[in-house]
Amino acid sequence: MALYALTGSDTGGTTRAVREGNALDGGMQSAGNVGYEHAQVGHEYWAGLPLPWNTSRSDIRRTAAEFTHVPKGLKVVEYRAFDAGETDGNVIFASTDADESSMGDLFKMRNYAGRAMTVKANSSSRVYYVARVKVTGPVHDSLSGCRYSYRQGATQYPTTHRLLHRRPSRTPLK
């Protein structure tokens, strides 16, 4: 079964159907649940998107990533992309405060967001995306769903993964 997404075009605002890609897999990280019981209203955190695996026989160029569902009580401030080799692994959920985070100060790390990154055939990406999220109030749902955009050959594809994964906590501390 082919999945399609509607996209706008630069031809006067008409929409067209775009076949959803299937070359990227969210792997084990897209199947787990992560919580953070110390989240506080007004504070910001890094929430990692799953590290994608290119399941195809051709290289792809990943161009963007985002959560598809941001619950009430959370606000995505920005998306960044980091090389796992430069950050000693990839972020699942961590404070943006370098003194509280085992990942160090990610604000000082090179940001690859906005650049097309190659993911070799049959391998995982070295570059992973994170969302900087701010807790604005009680959170009763999870960040969920992940959409990657990538180019394979001359075709640009969206691909969406089910992701029930990132929850700061049910009741943020005040």
Image: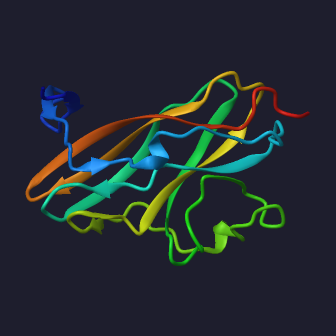
Q: Is residue 163 above or below residue 121?
A: above
Q: Residue at x 65, y 23 (%)?
A: 72
Q: Residue at x 19, y 36 (%)?
A: 20
From the viewer's side, name the closer residue of 139 and 29. 29
Which image quadrant: the N terminus? top left
Q: Is residue 39 left or right of residue 84?
A: right
Which image quadrant: the C terminus? top right
Most extreme residue toward the bottom is: 86
Count the marks. Answer: 0
Residue 40, image x and y in percent? 83, 39
Residue 121, image x and y in percent? 20, 65
Most extreme residue toward the right is: 174
Residue 105, image x and y in percent? 71, 70
Q: Is residue 100 above or below residue 40?
A: below
Location of residue 141 (image quadrant):
top right
Q: Is residue 27 left or right of residue 38?
A: left
